Image (spheres, rainbow, N blue to C red):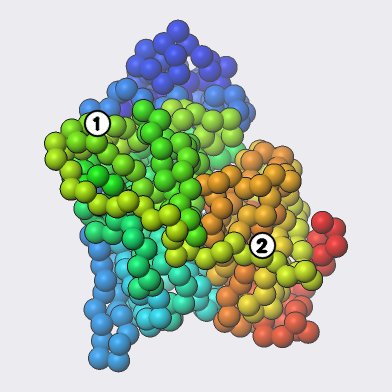
Amino acid sequence: MRNEIRLPCHTTTSPGGAGSNGATMDRRGFLGLVGIAGAALLTGCTPGAGSAGRGNTGGLAWSTRLHVPSVDAGTVAADGTRRFRLRAQAGRSQFISGKSTTSWGFNGPYLGPTLRAQSGERVAMEVHNELAESTTVHWHGMRLPAAMDGTPHQPVEAGSVWRPTWTIDQPASTLWYHPHPHGDTAVHVYRGLAGMWIIDDGIPDGLPGTYGSDDIPLIIQDRNIGADGSLREDDTVPIWGLMGNDILVNGTHGPYLEVHTRLVRFRVLNASNARMYNLRLSDGRPITIVGNDCALLPAPVQVDEISLSPAERAEIVVAFNPGETVVLTSRSGDNGLDEGEFDILQLRAATTLRTNGPVPSSLPGPAPIAPPADARTRRFVLSGNSKINGREMEMGRIDEVVPVGATEIWEIDNTVYSHNFHVHDAAFSILDIDGHDPPAYASGWKDTVFVGGHKTAKVAVTFGHHADPTTPYMYHCHILQHEDKGMMGQFTLVESTTQTSPPSGMPRTAGRHEHAASDS
Ligand code: C2O
Ligand code: CU
Ligand code: CU
């Protein structure tokens, strides 16, 4: 049941029940059946009305072993600098056995290696663009100078090389990298340009930590795979863009993983363009959360479900019994973006499991970020699918100027359907969502927060230490179609608090102070 497609919005229930085989349809059959008229019908769908998919539960063969991206720890030069080389390139992938198709990747046909380095190290990246068009590579979650951030301001033209370098200065965490060319991020990521970045800090965490054995990356992406095995690029939901009904994990469709230890740590990254997942194990067993986007937690948190919107990460630990099989699934939710039930990964425990663990009762993650009493508040109003504070992103406009190292309160006020909000070169703690405490699974340091329809999220955000008054960082919705359409703003970090207005030469924005401070 690989080629399933969402049914028209009004058919949200069926005799077969959500996600059962009886309730799903083969895409080829579906398109053959309804053709153009059906496509037009789908265009009229609205969020929350069944537009985003019915899922794929119960139909996967689990016949392909989960691919685990290789670790690339670079090479250490005589001066101690850790050097990495990434080549963005086109290649051939087989998402469906026997069907070879064009895809993009770093150093391979799809996705990229898991980069790994230590906090405190100097890293030097060599990014070769071997594609036929310009792209960028952004180090999502990294604290680094704006000129190294890989935003639309650091294009890597076709055939050229970009060489950013910085010193890693942040706690152990699971970050990622992906293109950020303005207007083209969605399609570049969709074709396969993304990878994981693991930062170590040398502080023992007592958690499973043998990469590929009891420490497994899970890069979850939804795709629409055509009958010929190709990645179909048409937007499927007008307001959200590409929503797929074929789930890939590390580029593997219908994957299984054999586990050989009692506890397994998974570094879960939602690298989808728009889809949100409500992850749980098929038998409802507990999931122990040990880390969020930017750091480990100070103590593990046990839940039975974890929601991840695009770009969010979670480090989780799951316990297994010998010989059992359990499936990682995604429950359908009511946020529009998370509609449809999906089976994601089948986990097969070996008949004997090596004992590891237990998960320590306290972890080395940092305490929540507490805003100072006089913290400045900035407000960001999200509207439609392209605007923050009433404006679309403009390359030449700096929207906010922030003192280096500041801790501020950022309030994200969503006036419409689901969005999320990501801030570069920063980490934040969620203070509240609509006045309620953040969910337990999102209590650690983060760089992306989900903001459901008509909700307000308040975060205490702390910024990096690299001043550059002319090169901006970005904040944006990480639904990639929204980001591409302009639901993004630019901020600079500056040395002194007296200098916090846009530099001359950069158009001054009328609205910059309207939404600052005091209106919280
Ligand atoms: Cu991932 Cu700008 O982000
Ligand atoms: Cu980012
Ligand atoms: Cu959005």
Q: In the rendered image of this protein, does residue 131 appear above or below residue 52?
A: below
Mark 2: secondary structure: strand
Quarter containing the N terminus:
top left
Q: Amino acid at mark 2?
A: Ala
Residue 121 in percent (x, y) is at: 37, 81
Q: Report the label total.
A: 2
Foreground residue among 411 and 120? 120
Residue 399 in percent (x, y) is at: 71, 67
Left or right? Give the position of 113 relative to 260: right
Q: In the rendered image of this protein, does residue 289 appear above or below residue 159?
A: above
Q: Which residue is mark 2?
A: 460
Left or right? Give the position of 385 relative to 132: right
Foreground residue among 150 and 72? 72
Q: In the rendered image of this protein, does residue 249 appear above or below residue 407?
A: above
For image coordinates 66% across by 47% down, the residue present is 437
For image coordinates 45% across by 70% down, the residue present is 171
Q: Residue furthest bottom?
A: 79
Q: Which residue is mark 1?
A: 325
